[in-house]
Image (spheres, helix red, strand yellow):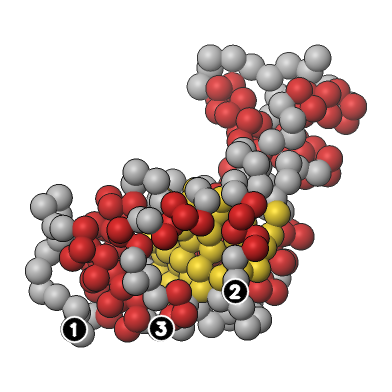
Amino acid sequence: RSDPARMFFFADKRQEPRVESFLFGLDDFDPNEFQAREPLQDSLFDWAQGQGSKMAVHGMGGTGKSSLAKDFIVRASESPVVKEDIGIFIRFQQFLRNDYISLVPFLEDIIGGDKTSSTSVGADTSNEDLRDRVNACLKKLQGRWIITIDDVGAPESYTNNDMLKGFPWAKGRVIVTTRSEAWTTKVGFQALRVESLSDAEALALVRDRVRHWSSESDGEVMRFVSELGAFPLALSQAFATCASGKGRVAAP
């Protein structure tokens, strides 16, 4: 069953009634610290209810691709209008092996008595064994999962990765978050570009997060936002610094 500590809830028109979901890799995601970007979410929901199974979420660093993908897979896996009820977020770069070590028992627990192996996994488990067990589980759970592979480089970096050989693309839905435009031309992929925040999104984020803002002027807020390029990551880091007591946000 889903771990209640890992389940997140949203007031969202797509989630009536909410269904039980199984979520992996989302322990650090707090929806209260994320500015929902509904037009982008709408595009992802359209994709999840259509025929395509692969999506490239691409854009410059700091635009919020990872947070968007996390928000989406939580919403989608809990939504009755999307058939997949397992949402998985794994990190491509140096963390992929560690994520697979945790992903194997997560998937095998969902499968239950029909596990692919009774052997536990750990630091001494080979890449090949981890890969084969994850792939076997995803095949058994066909049609039930949406997986995000986060921060992937150019397509060749994926094809050269030993951990992802034989990945069962056709058995579920896959989102790749990337800075590389090359994914948008890959056969079978749909693409969604993520830009910096719109004025309305940026204003909503600042007003929500900076409770002590002294000015009621949207113009002053937007001058601050412009200084940081309206990038969600830069704004979030500024807010975190203020919250830690190491600085404060002040209107220019």
> Is residue 91 rendered to the left or right of residue 53?
left
Q: Which image quarter holds the N terminus? A: bottom left
Query: On residue 142, which mark appears?
Result: 3
Real-space Cα separation, disc 3 to disc 2, in angstroms = 18 Å
Residue 188's disc is 2
Nearer-N-terminus badge (1/2): 1
The earlier-in-sequence mark between 3 and 2 is 3
Q: Residue at x 35, y 56 (%)?
A: 161
Q: In the rendered image, which quarter contains the C terminus?
A: top right
Mark before the other along the chain sequence, 3 or 1: 1
Residue 49 vs residue 74: left or right?
A: right
Kind of element beneath mark 3: loop
Residue 187 shows up from this direction:
yes
**Amino acid at circle 1:** Gly
> Which is closer to the viewer, label 3 or label 1?
3
Please identify the quarter of the rendering in which residue 162 is found.
bottom left
Alpha carbon separation for disc pair 3 and 1: 17 Å
* Percent of width and height locating residue 188: 59, 74
Give, as a three-letter code, the residue at label 2.
Answer: Gly
Question: Percent from the top left, x then y, of residue 97?
Answer: 28, 52
Find disc 1 in the rendering and name its residue: 113
Q: Is residue 30 left or right of residue 34?
A: left
